[in-house]
Image (cartoon, grey):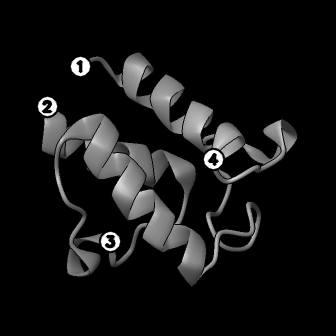
Amino acid sequence: MSRQEIEEKVRAFLIDDLEIDEDKIFPEAKLKEDMGIDSLDFVDIVVIVEKNFGFKIKPEEMQGVVTLSQFCDYIETKVG
């Protein structure tokens, strides 16, 4: 799966499932501060990522993932 495909899938579920405004979704957007993703949203993200990408997110691996770009990097390392 290419980086572009990953970014498109992530963008789609952020807009469709989490109802985040499209203008808040950009590579350096901070997941919590800019996009407003909270702990309940994160539970949804875990389920969505497992369904779309076929792996489970381990919370300890998400330490230091702050921006959307870093989140896509994380997914890319798992599916690449």
**Residue 62's disc number:** 3
Q: If you read the primary sequence from the N terminus, does the residue marked by circle 1 or circle 2 appear first?
A: 1
Q: Earlier in the sequence, mark 2 or mark 3?
A: 3
Distance Cα–Cα, label 1 vs label 4? 21 Å
Q: Mark 4 is on which residue type?
A: Asp
Which amino acid type corresponds to the residue marked 2 in the rendered image? Gly
| SS class, disc 3 | helix
Q: Is residue 26 visible?
A: no
Q: Are dots 4 and 3 in contact, CB under 8 Å? A: no
Estimate the spatial distance between the alpha carbons at disc 4 and disc 3, rounded to whole Å. 20 Å
Residue 12 point in image, percent of width and height: 60, 31
44 to the left or right of 58: right
What label does residue 80 carry, if any?
2
Q: Is residue 24 visible?
A: yes
Q: Residue at x 46, y 59 (%)?
A: 45
- Sequence-earlier tag: 1 or 4: 1
Disc 1 residue type (three-letter): Met
